[in-house]
Image (tube, grey):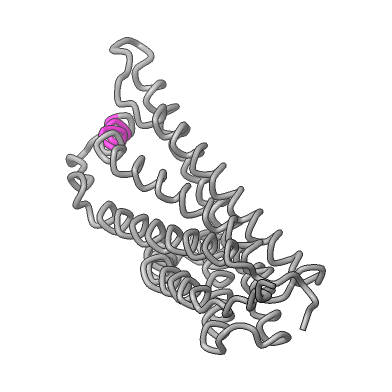
Amino acid sequence: MSDAPELTPAWRTWGRLVAAIAAVSFALTAFLTLLDSLSLTAPALSFPAGAELPDRILIILQNQADRFPVIFVSSLLAIVAYSALAALGPVLRRALGGVGVPRGTVLVAGFAIAGAIGVIGELLYIGGLAIASDATYCECAFRDAQLIARGGVLDVVTSMQSWMTWGLVSFFGIGLFAAASLCAATHLAPRGWSLLSRALAALLVLVAVLGAGFPPLAHSMGWDVDPNLVVGAPSLVILLILLPWWALWLRAWLGHAAPPEAEPAAS
């Protein structure tokens, strides 16, 4: 066991608060994302037969504008979730006896980098989407070129957000592997929570690999498979169930505070 500083009551209280925030914000983010993907927040995309590319792009932009309020709220909740994730790193390092231990440093760094990438990615996504999804355009000779360019910007914004998501998922997985390794070394955490952390880390890395590698693979192989379905289903399970479960279990574990030391009797 590391001779790290004891997890003080103040650290326990802070950790429980941050874990609760992470659980709720991740679950709400996943719930809003599910509603949006099921077209319950805006009408589903529908293209008239024989519509030209500029007209199809205009329909997409109008749909994005209709969905933007829900996407905006979901992104704000995601920012809160990623910030809470980064804040949990130092708490876990103390809770698992990792202060001054290389694995403790990896844990904190993994959580911090994942949180930073997530926050920056969501801010860029919101800002880019607010401009790209604006369905207003010039009714002039440049109409078609403007709409096609706007569609290109929307593709770039979406692609950037996706790749930043795979990056943060990878770093979070690395941090979780470090946490699980510390659990095995110090035996300070419940065994079940340690196993859940390891399983969650493996799933996160798998989702990152699928998200980054499956779309180009499916395209090159000519597979008629929706990449969003392949990646979205496990991602939804992680965000809506596993991550909140992991965070709430952590909160409950941190609540089992060590009894306070007896104060010396007054003379």
74 w.r.t. 48: above or below: below
In the depicted view, which residue is nearer to us: 216 or 3? 3
Residue placed at 27% from the left, 52% from the top?
A: 36
Q: Position of residue 162 (x, y in %)?
A: 51, 51
Q: Is residue 201 left or right of residue 61?
A: right
Which residue occupies the extreme top position in the image?
140
In the depicted view, which residue is nearer to us: 20 or 158? 20
Question: Which quadrant, please, contains the C terminus?
Answer: bottom right
Residue 57 located within the stretch drawn in magenta:
yes
Residue placed at 32% from the left, 13% from the top?
A: 138
Q: Is residue 64 left or right of residue 14?
A: left
For the image, the number of numbered tags is: 0
Q: Magenta span: helix, strand or loop, mainly?
A: helix
Q: Position of residue 123 (x, y in %)?
A: 50, 38
Q: Splitting the image into 4 quarters, where does residue 90 fall?
A: bottom right
Q: Position of residue 63 (x, y in %)?
A: 26, 38
Q: Splitting the image into 4 quarters, where does residue 24 fall?
A: bottom left
Residue 260 showing in the rendered view: yes
In the depicted view, which residue is nearer to us: 134 or 245? 245
Q: Is residue 116 left or right of residue 61?
A: right
180 w.r.t. 244: above or below: below
Residue 60 located within the stretch drawn in magenta:
yes
Q: Position of residue 265 (x, y in %)?
A: 66, 76
Question: Which quadrant, please, contains the N terminus?
Answer: bottom right
Q: Which residues are magenta?
A: 55-62
In the depicted view, which residue is nearer to us: 88 or 255? 255
Residue placed at 47% from the left, 39% from the top?
A: 125
Q: Splitting the image into 4 quarters, where does residue 235 fall?
A: bottom left
